[in-house]
């Protein structure tokens, strides 16, 4: 049996000022959300998605003990917190936040996605955030509701609090957080990276959507499919507006998408690429391309001036909507296909862990500039910096190329000294400039 998208609901009325999560408006939104595929994840609820495995009997599924954290501080989003703690967790260990897809749970995601394998192997804590039917009828993270995706609000604030609690309760390093998620969890991953770029070093969006695409249930339809086409600068501005004044460094971002995804159009991978390459001040043409894994997944890399890959796009051939896994005991294998939307193809968990720099073999340190060669410095107004290619302009504002530091209005009256180090990467000058 195949899936088709349900009819579009009539647009809801505007939310009254000060409406509460449990009020009539929230119930209306949740009811409408229950009819949307990614916005609600209805496609995760039944059989038939291309590339998905048939459900295995319960005894075939490998389960790992998750610890429920009953209280982790402020919880405005009404989420549940679970953790997977390896037997040997070093002090100041990194933490990875994992966000399940619609109709799923923390336990389902833990049992099938394969992240715990690498947590055991490399020593990091996994925090599984979980939403409920109280928030969304189909247990989707509310990636399309601004009240749940803005800094300091709703579900986003609850997830942030989980990271702070993990540092206190488990001794993890709050400066080494990463986040990943599937579908609605992937779209929420985009939101966390935008709202809290000071918290996350990196993220991996699996079958997700760019930040700022939807503002309600109705607009989520177009974001899901065919996808929204916006200029890279516009996408980047949505990220910058999520945390005004943040000067970087911005999180590194990996984007995973199946070529045959009929729920979230593969075009979303292109728009996510445009969003995060523009945030990093990069072009949209990859510097390196390669094939990886047992199914020749195509990887495109977008490195910064220092050679470190800060955006990567993984296009998985022949699969539909779900998390790519590769069950087995090999070094590059992981996961299970005991429930739907975990698709036997490539162990994305292995490559995500590597991209996150948690396997001890990747993300090389930037090269040290030769001490005998002074940094190049330029003092000019913002107009001249843009004309010379040292900065870019978006919406009348100017940002240093490479670092993304905000320089103010695009005019001849605002002057700054910029330092170039390394080549092509500009920052506001320090004492090393005359």
Image (cartoon, grey):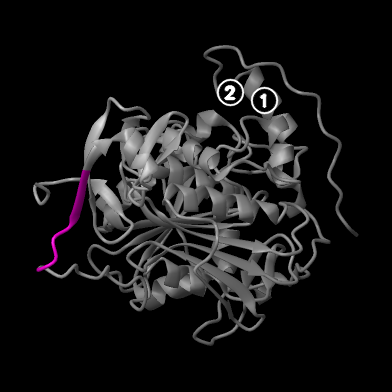
Report helix, strand or loop for mark 2. Answer: loop
Tag count in the figure? 2
Q: Is residue 377 magenta?
A: yes
**Among all residues in the image, which is located at the extreme right?**
1
Q: Could you tell me residue 20's position as x and y percent?
A: 54, 19
- Asked whether residue 47 appears in the rendered view, the answer is yes
Q: Residue at x 35, y 52 (%)?
A: 402
Report the side of 109 relative to 429 (left or right).
right
**Quadrant hosting residue 95:** bottom left
- Mark 2 and mark 1 residues within 8 Å of each other at the beta carbon: yes
Q: Is residue 381 magenta?
A: no
| Above or below: residue 75 compared with residue 201 | above
Q: Residue at x 30, y 69 (%)?
A: 89
Q: Which mark is residue 48?
A: none
Residue named by callout 2: 22
Q: Could you tell me residue 431's position as x and y percent?
A: 8, 47
Q: Could you tell me residue 386's position as x and y percent?
A: 38, 40
Q: Sequence order check: which comes first, mark 2 or mark 1?
A: 2
Report helix, strand or loop for mark 1. Answer: helix
Q: Could you tell me residue 172's position as x and y percent?
A: 28, 58
Q: Nearer the viewer, residue 87 or 231?
A: 231
Q: Residue at x 41, y 65 (%)?
A: 356
First to last magenta residue range: 372-378
Real-space Cα separation, disc 2 to disc 1, in angstroms? 7 Å
């Amino acid at each position: 049996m195949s899936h088709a998208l349900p009819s579009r609901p009539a647009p809801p009325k505007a939310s009254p000022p000060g409406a509460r999560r449990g009020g009539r408006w929230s119930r209306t939104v949740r009811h409408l959300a229950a009819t949307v595929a990614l916005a609600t994840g209805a496609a995760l609820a039944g059989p038939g998605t291309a590339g998905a495995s048939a459900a295995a009997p319960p005894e075939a599924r490998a389960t790992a003990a998750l610890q429920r954290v009953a209280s982790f501080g402020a919880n405005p989003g009404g989420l549940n917190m679970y953790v997977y703690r390896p037997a040997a967790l070093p002090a100041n260990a990194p933490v990875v936040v994992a966000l399940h897809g619609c109709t799923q749970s923390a336990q389902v995601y833990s049992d099938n996605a394969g992240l715990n394998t690498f947590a055991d192997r490399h020593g990091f804590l996994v925090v599984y955030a979980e939403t409920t039917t109280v928030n969304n009828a189909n247990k989707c993270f509310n990636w399309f509701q601004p009240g749940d995706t803005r800094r300091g609000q709703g579900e986003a604030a609850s997830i942030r609090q989980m990271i702070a609690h993990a540092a206190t309760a488990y001794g993890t390093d709050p400066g080494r957080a990463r986040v990943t998620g599937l579908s609605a969890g992937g779209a929420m991953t985009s939101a966390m990276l935008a709202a809290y770029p000071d918290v996350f070093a990196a993220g991996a969006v699996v079958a997700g959507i760019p930040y700022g695409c939807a503002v309600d249930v109705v607009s989520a339809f177009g974001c899901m499919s065919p996808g929204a086409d916006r200029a890279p600068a516009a996408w980047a501005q949505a990220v910058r507006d999520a945390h005004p004044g943040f000067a970087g460094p911005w999180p590194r971002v990996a984007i995973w998408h199946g070529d045959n995804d009929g729920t979230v159009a593969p075009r979303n991978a292109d728009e996510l690429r445009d969003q995060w390459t523009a945030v990093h001040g990069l072009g949209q043409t990859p510097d390196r391309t390669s094939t990886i894994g047992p199914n020749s997944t195509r990887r495109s890399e977008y490195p910064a001036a220092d050679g470190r890959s800060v955006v990567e796009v993984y296009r998985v051939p022949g699969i539909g909507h779900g998390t790519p896994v590769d069950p087995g005991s090999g070094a590059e294998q992981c996961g299970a296909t005991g429930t739907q939307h975990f698709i036997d193809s490539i162990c994305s968990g292995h490559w995500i862990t590597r991209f996150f720099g948690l396997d001890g073999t990747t993300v090389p340190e930037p090269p040290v500039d030769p001490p005998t060669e002074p940094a190049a410095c330029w003092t000019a107004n913002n107009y001249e910096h843009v004309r010379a290619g040292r900065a870019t302009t978006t919406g009348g504002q100017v940002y240093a190329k490479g670092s993304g530091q905000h320089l103010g209005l695009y005019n001849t009256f605002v002057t700054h000294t910029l330092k170039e180090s390394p080549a092509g990467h500009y920052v506001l000058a320090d004492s090393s400039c005359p």
